[in-house]
Amino acid sequence: MRGVHSLGALSALTSAEGEALREHFKRVGFVFERLGAAEAILPNQLDAVRLPIVQWRLRQEKSAGAALTRLFLYDDVLTEPEAREAFGDTFALAALRGLIVAAEGGFVAPLRLSPYFGLWLLGDVLTGDPEVAMGPGATTHALSGLVPMEGAGRVLDLGCGSGTLALLAASRGADAVGLDINPRAVAMAEINARLNGLTARFLVSDIYASVGDARFDLIVAQPPFVMNPEEGAETTFLHGGRWGDELALRMIAQTPARLVAGGRAHFRIDLLMRPKEPPHGRIRAALGDAPVDLLLLIARGHSIDQAAMAYANVEDPTFGARYAETAHRYLAHMTGLGARESSQTLLTLSLPKVPRPDQSTIVLPLPSVARFSVEALAVLEAGLGHASLPPTALVGHKLSVAPGAQFVERRGAADRNAQSQVSVSFPGSWQGEQSLSESALALVQCLDESPSLGHAIAAYAALLETQATAVEAEVLRMVRELLARGVLRVVR
Ligand SMILES: C[S@@+](CC[C@H](N)C(=O)[O-])C[C@H]1O[C@@H](n2cnc3c(N)ncnc32)[C@H](O)[C@@H]1O
């Protein structure tokens, strides 16, 4: 499906009309929590497979909130009586501004409208059309958690799409700017600002070209990161170059000069793993001698087969002939490059408040980058800080398993004598589930029962019937790793 819906009627949306729509959406329960409940139906399946099931469940509810959810987010048609009931007093306004259009069987929504943390954000249905303006999606989430609840100062949303992150920051009191190379994205972001009664500046810009020499406290970006098998045929919101990371690296290279001292930039990108070339090497090379610390969190991403299917599904959501042809093209391209898998990454650049002669580069494999938040990042950084303490300082601290931990033991059902596998799980959190070796588990128990790491080393050595000096180096190595991965915390 190509072609985008004209924004002509919506461009005339006034602030008063925006307020009327918001009040109505709130009143009938077309809110973020409802979207969360709908997304919990068959999660992790391709949309095309789960769509009919989600639509059916929402139809059973027979409420205005459920009807608006299936209309705006799950491609369903509302009969005219359903649409009139769902929109109530705002029905004529919704039709006037083109939020709904008449179609066979009733009304459809030509744009997506997502309730998002107290905002309502318009965006295009994602297709391969070069003009598409992207609204909030699953990958936007990791970044929205990194916009502080208040007091973020000057915030820049680079590649803002329909303005999600800039508007989220503005709703929390930040002085927000959104930049996008796609004029339709900027137009949509401005409409979203009016729809939500917020003030933010949106500019058409190739990377930072339109902001002069302005600097920011916080920069957030989710650049296009999909590899492009077809030279010249770019979809602006999707493709980032032949490997997919070329545009992101250009953005990253220009970012240190855009941060105030003490400022931070967060990028969320999927990286196609290059054979024998770790991603942090390319990122550091792009940064040159910029005096920034780099933290790169990496979680396992899709296999190239899954990636090919997902991207082809954007090009042809009907799973038709173009889906098959496009999937093949992606697959042949990735195979030709020698790539085997992609990784989900969250990259943070920090410009120190006080310049230092050296910069840190930390790469941390984690089970998930999806549930990141300002608080999670603070915990992670504290863990990394403690992990790098000298032994003399570290042994004096009391260490314990991080809050929310649940220990899970698995034994093969078929073989009662099989070795059990133990892991520590943090449900709903970025630490995910991490396996623990037998020795790490024994150590964790000693740490919980001891007033300091020094005492725990002695207890662990006694368990192994050996001297503390014989195990100290190995214990310190395990402790540093568990601190860095968020499994252990320093207790104050
Ligand atoms: C993956 S979308 C992310 C949209 C939005 N930030 C979000 O998270 O929902 C990437 C955005 O980057 C924009 N973009 C692509 N090339 C750009 C460039 N050279 N300069 C600025 N923005 C660009 C695209 O138009 C698109 O809106």
Image (cartoon, helix red, strand yellow):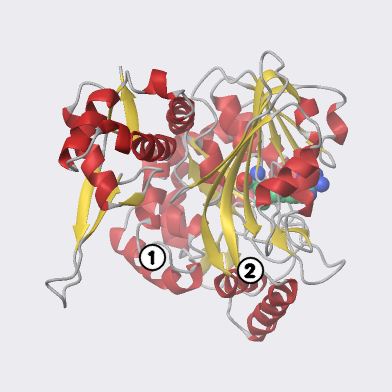
Q: Quadrant of residue 202?
A: top right
Classify 486 as above or below 490.
Answer: below
The amino acid type, in three-letter code, at marker 1 is Val
Q: Nearer the viewer, residue 117 or 241?
A: 241
Q: Quadrant of residue 245?
A: bottom right
Q: Quadrant of residue 240?
A: bottom right
Q: Position of residue 58 (x, y in %)?
A: 35, 61
Disc number placed over residue 54 in the picture, else none = 1
Q: Position of residue 6 (x, y in %)?
A: 74, 55
Decide if residue 432 is in sight here: yes
Q: Among all residues in the image, which is located at the extreme top?
A: 354
| Label 1 CB less than 8 angstroms from ligand 1 | no
Decide if residue 100 is in sight here: no
Circle nearer the viewer, 1 or 2: 2
Classify 267 as above or below 397.
Answer: below
Q: Nearer the viewer, residue 30 or 186?
A: 186
Classify 33 as above or below 313.
Answer: above
Q: Secondary structure at mark 1?
A: helix
Q: Among all residues in the image, which is located at the extreme left?
A: 416
- The residue pinned by badge 2 equals 311
First in residue order: circle 1 vs circle 2: 1
The amino acid type, in three-letter code, at marker 2 is Tyr
- The crowd level at tag 1 (other Cα within 10 Å; few <14, some 14-19, many 20+) is some
Q: Position of residue 93 (x, y in %)?
A: 58, 44
The residue at 47%/42% (across/down) is 89
